[in-house]
Image (cartoon, coloured by chain):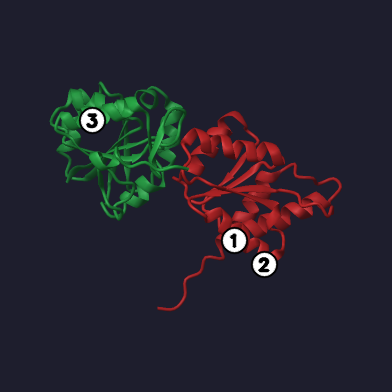
Amino acid sequence: MSLLLYRIDDRLIHGQVVVGWGQPLALKFIVLVDDDVASSEWEQELYRMGVPPGMDVYFHSVSDMDTRLRGYQDEQRAGLLLVGSIDTMQRLVVAHPALRTVNVGGVHFAEGRAQRLRYVFLTPTEEATLRDLQTRGVDVTAQDLPGTRPMALDELLTTRQDG
Amino acid sequence: MSDTPVVVAVVAGHGRFADGLVSAVEQITGRGAAFVPVSNTGLSPSDLEALIGSSLDSTGARVVFTDLPAGSCTMATRRIQRLRRDVVLVTGANVAVLMEFLFAAENALGTPVGGLSNVAALATTAADKARHTIVVSGG
């Protein structure tokens, strides 16, 4: 079982994660890796309230994962690792080169970002970071839900949507 | 009661959830204008929080109905509640709870001493009543 998905989603825990992916993957736990959330009891309680019964959520900083990632990968239960930004995922990949797949699930509009998909907006720096992950051997795809077609990074970065 | 529609709550959810609920309320009661629909589609967490917040501010409503307890609209409203203790959140909304709340709120508004001083109690009562409208039969 182990960690079935390594997802970038700026909404962190929300409907697509706990239901959209949670049901078909029969997820039993979420590992939320975010330095801010890991240092805030209030943020953790907020996200804990969003997790349905029967699903655990664990909060960690990026540095925590130095000692914790292997344990989650060896879990017998199905899990999902979740980060809120491309930068955070890059830090994880640099620290854990064995991490091979990354799902871009939600990076929404902000100043300086160009729209690539309905749910993916990227700055040039973020595009370069995703390219860096690819160079490191990571299979980067964009996919919001299990039923939609995963889009490879090369296609994602040549896709442009307006409005 | 004034002829001017009074917005009693914001309805927020995934996709066209809110539009659908509000259109159903409109079709059944003619009072759809009492609710402001908000969709999370395409919005970042901060933009969604800002939209729900501005919808509350511009209408004076203090109640937000959302779809999923784990949904981004629920999360955004909980963040608003951190700063605004008077905001009431109701998750798992359906047409029944909106109508129950609508009529309870209108009755309260029409009562000179009632006002909407206790929207949390009105929302709780509406949720309790609406919960019983989910019925399974057959099979």
Report how many numbered discs are placed on residues in the image: 3
Which label sits on residue B28?
A: 2
CB within 8 Å, label 3 to label 2: no
Judge whether residue B138 can be spotted in this image.
Answer: yes
Residue A90, image x, y percentages: 25, 26
Looking at this view, is A59 or A151 the one in front?
A: A151
Q: Name the residue under label 1.
A: B95
Q: Rate crowding at label 2 as few (under 14), some (14 to 19) or many (20 or more) other CA atoms within 10 Å.
A: few
Which residue appears farthest toward the right when viewing the image? B112
Looking at this view, is A56 or A122 the one in front?
A: A122
Amino acid type at image mark 2: Ile
Q: Name the residue under label 3.
A: A131
Residue A26, image x, y percentages: 26, 52
Q: Is residue B26 above or below residue A106?
A: below
To which chain does the residue with label 3 belong? Answer: A
Palette colour of chain B: red
Palette colour of chain A: green
State the separation of the CA atoms marked 1 and 2: 10 Å
Which residue appears farthest toward the bottom when viewing the image? B138
Q: Rate crowding at label 1 as few (under 14), some (14 to 19) or many (20 or more) other CA atoms within 10 Å.
A: some
Q: Which of marks 1 and 2 is in front?
A: 2
